[in-house]
Image: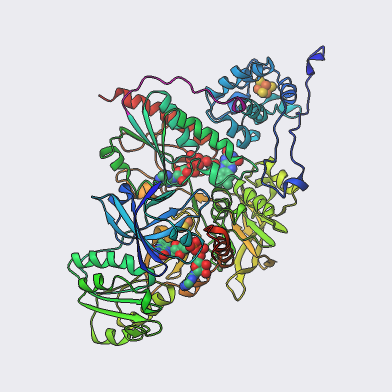
Amino acid sequence: MAESKPKPKVRKQAVPIPKQPPEVRKHNFNEVALGYTEEQALEEANRCLQCPKPQCIRGCPVEIDISTFIRLLREGKYDEAIKKIKEKNSLPAICGRVCPQEEQCQKMCVLGKVGEPVSIGRLERFLADWERARGFTVPEKAPSTGKRVAIVGAGPAGLTAAADLAKLGHEVVIFEALHLAGGVLVYGIPEFRLPKSIVQAEVDYIKKLGVELKLGYLIGRTYTIPELLKKRGFDAVFIGTGAGLPQFLGIPGENLGGIYSANEFLIRVNLMKAYAFPEYDTPIRIGRHVAVIGGGNVAMDAARSALRLGAEQVCIVYRRSREEMPARKEEIENAEEEGIICKFLAAPTRFIGNEKGWVKQMECICMELGPPDESGRRRPVPVKGSEFLMDIDTAIIAIGRTPNPIIQSTTEGLAVTKWGTIVTDENGKTSLEGVYAGGDIVTGEATVISAMGAGKKAARAIHEYLMNKK
Amino acid sequence: MYEILSVRELAPKIKLFEVHAPEIAEKARPGQFIMVIINEKGERVPLTIAEYDAGKGTIAFAFNEVGKTTKQLGTLKEGDRVWNITGPLGNPSEIRNFGRVLCVAGGVMIAPMLLQIKALHETGNTVVAVVGARIKELLFFKEEIKALSHKFYVATDDGSEGYKSLEFLKDVLAEEKFDRCVAMGPVPMLKTVSEFTKPFGIPTVVTLMPVMVDGMGMCGVCRVSVGGKMKFGCVDGPEFDGHLVDYEELIKRQRMFLPEERLSSLLWELGGCGCGRK
Ligand SMILES: Cc1cc2nc3c(=O)[nH]c(=O)nc-3n(C[C@H](O)[C@H](O)[C@H](O)COP(=O)(O)OP(=O)(O)OC[C@H]3O[C@@H](n4cnc5c(N)ncnc54)[C@H](O)[C@@H]3O)c2cc1C
Ligand SMILES: Cc1cc2nc3c(=O)[nH]c(=O)nc-3n(C[C@H](O)[C@H](O)[C@H](O)COP(=O)(O)OP(=O)(O)OC[C@H]3O[C@@H](n4cnc5c(N)ncnc54)[C@H](O)[C@@H]3O)c2cc1C
Ligand code: SF4
Ligand code: FES
């Protein structure tokens, strides 16, 4: 349809993505963004200028050849287009949905200077969904090398490393502590942003590659890393255990009923499917007035889940201002459209409970922004005497997550930073021979794509290590 | 899938399951627990390891049929399977020669206490054991524990067997010297025992059973206040210094989901077993 134009002219506006209307979607857990139709995808792809020196690629953490895949897409060669993406990104259906493209490829796109950048993420998603609807074909695997690799943690880092190593002919076993694979993709990011069937399709694909998945194995307890190498016959180990430890505020009243860490809240809802209680056994209690503390993706996800579970009012309390909010812009907009209120420049100082030990109020103090801190964002400073009370019956604390410590504390000789992250070189090699690591466990909380990229790099390094070993 | 190899009814509504779980059996130590998920829709239920045998590749756990999941578990038979078991979780108990150890166990926790007493006995401790229950019908493992103990006491809430309530412990403590006390059971019991041992300065270790979801440090629902500090029951515990635990807070936190638990249990009883019986 867009072909009828005689001369290419820059179209400043991106083709909008169809979404469930806010009034409808705030009552269900179905996906919010519905994805481009074929027509819409072609129309959007046609906006691309096919720059001789594409800037978008520089913004992509795994250097997908973006302009080429867009060209293939608009030539109708969907199959080749998705292959192009998959050369660099093994989880496009997921990344197309959750990557912060506005901070990465789309931020660099030249069209962004005159209008809206090409919606690269939406095109990626279109192709990935197109492929999934047809069913994945399992690529040919290299002949067996006879080497065995253990992958610890089935998040994006671990899943990617597993897939790449299996394709190279190694025997791969994933040990995942939880009873489902996917890491944050299954226990953290909600269904309405990333349907679990998509994650499951990726996991199934990895199983088809011959990867064995062992669920309910907490490494450090069931086996330790040295045991995997010395007693269980693995030649190398990749650690992708993520940053899964919730942080608390450390203020009075935090142990009252009704106060959840975002992780508890999201694990109950996503992993344990508490939204379907009592069909599923795990319960959740949502009050009428919910306060979510924090300003990142996790806070948005928790707030929007609370709304969908029937809360009357959900308020996000963030200590800096809108500009500093680390959450994706699109998700902040989605949240506000759904009726979530943001209270900026405020931080809780204590929780007050009722006689049954349930939270009934949260005391906050107003903040103002001082000079920038180490992170480059302006530091919030409390305003003396500005305390105020909010009536709430649920609070969700989403102020960050730290590395899972169990491997570090049970693996002698593994170098760890003072923040508890594992020290590696740029290829994921740790201080121990044959032990590699990547993803949030190395970088601290980051993104799906960076975890995936780290998994890919480490897979390459592990392959080299194994092939050169005796 | 984990197969149930044997089912033993220890007392009314208290069962001991032996399951095939060689990898867990190899690593299990006294004081640790497992997470059991009965099926795909199930919750993750923490249960203390009551026996393990690396040679046979088995572990055992005892449970009290109190809510939806434990009632449902109670309907399973030898040869049935549970969907997932994760473990061993939590820190193992400190087991070494302390000298004279007072072991107090209540209710279903008498089962893991036997494991604890075996280990303490083997390392040369003199064990003085107290087992308690609401009524005498709920007592079990009396002979097994007695055989490993220097002294053995029974207490029931109604006095139907042995001493009525734990008050008698005050006298025992006044007369005998102990180097350590280990307590497992309901919170009020842990609290009472800790209050009794405190004036004598006896190091007292209690096993806490806060609400848990993942059991490996990821959610924080199991947080307890110990000596004014926030601790996670699953990864910092499950054993803590009994003299420092904020029991009132723990009791309140254990009741957080009571209405939902009751609903779940009721629905299960109405329709769950399919036999039409309530
Ligand atoms: C609510 C939420 C929303 C987010 N939204 C976005 C988003 O929109 N876009 C984006 O790019 N990023 C987002 N992120 C961040 C992103 O999900 C993470 O950066 C990414 O998942 C990290 O991947 P990983 O593989 O390193 O670790 P994880 O995904 O954390 O996976 C680690 C896995 O290891 C397992 N594990 C841990 N310890 C052990 C052990 N000892 N033995 C065995 N297994 C173990 C864990 O159970 C887990 O399954 C979000 C995070 C959260 C929490
Ligand atoms: C580390 C740890 C180890 C544990 N080890 C064991 C163990 O070895 N054996 C074991 O049986 N349990 C153990 N528990 C407790 C066990 O996990 C819970 O009882 C279990 O979650 C019950 O699940 P449910 O679905 O059957 O009941 P839930 O639905 O979780 O509800 C519990 C029910 O118990 C009822 N209830 C609560 N307290 C009492 C009480 N004092 N008397 C009567 N009813 C009560 C409530 O009304 C509620 O309906 C342990 C817990 C932890 C955290
Ligand atoms: S920078 Fe933008 S316009 Fe240029 S090739 Fe990349 S996506 Fe197309
Ligand atoms: S049970 Fe989740 S952190 Fe302890």
Specify the quadrant of the image occupied by residue B239. Answer: bottom left
* Count of marks placed on residues: 0
Q: Is residue B238 visible?
A: no
Dominant secondary structure of the residues highlighted in magenta in the image: loop
The residue drawn where x is 54% and y is 48% is A271
- Quick check: is A143 in the magenta stretch? yes
- Quick check: is A251 in the magenta stretch? no
From the viewer's perspective, is A368 left or right of B39? right
Residues B179 and B150: in front is B150
Residue B249 x %, y %: 50, 72
Q: Looking at the picture, does residue B256 appear above or below residue A454? A: below
Specify the quadrant of the image occupied by residue A189. Answer: top right
Residue A316 x %, y %: 67, 55
As drawn, the residue found furthest toward the top would be: A6
Q: Looking at the picture, does residue B173 appear above or below residue A136? A: below
From the viewer's perspective, is A323 left or right of B90? right
The residue drawn where x is 65% and y is 63% is A365
Residues A449 and B127: in front is B127
Residue A115 x %, y %: 76, 29
Residues A137 and A105: in front is A137
Residue A139 x %, y %: 48, 21
Residues A327 and A156: in front is A156
Render colour scheme:
rainbow
Q: Quadrant of the N terminus of chain A?
A: top right
Q: Quadrant of the C terminus of chain A?
A: top left
Query: Which portion, as a residue range, is magenta?
Result: A131-147
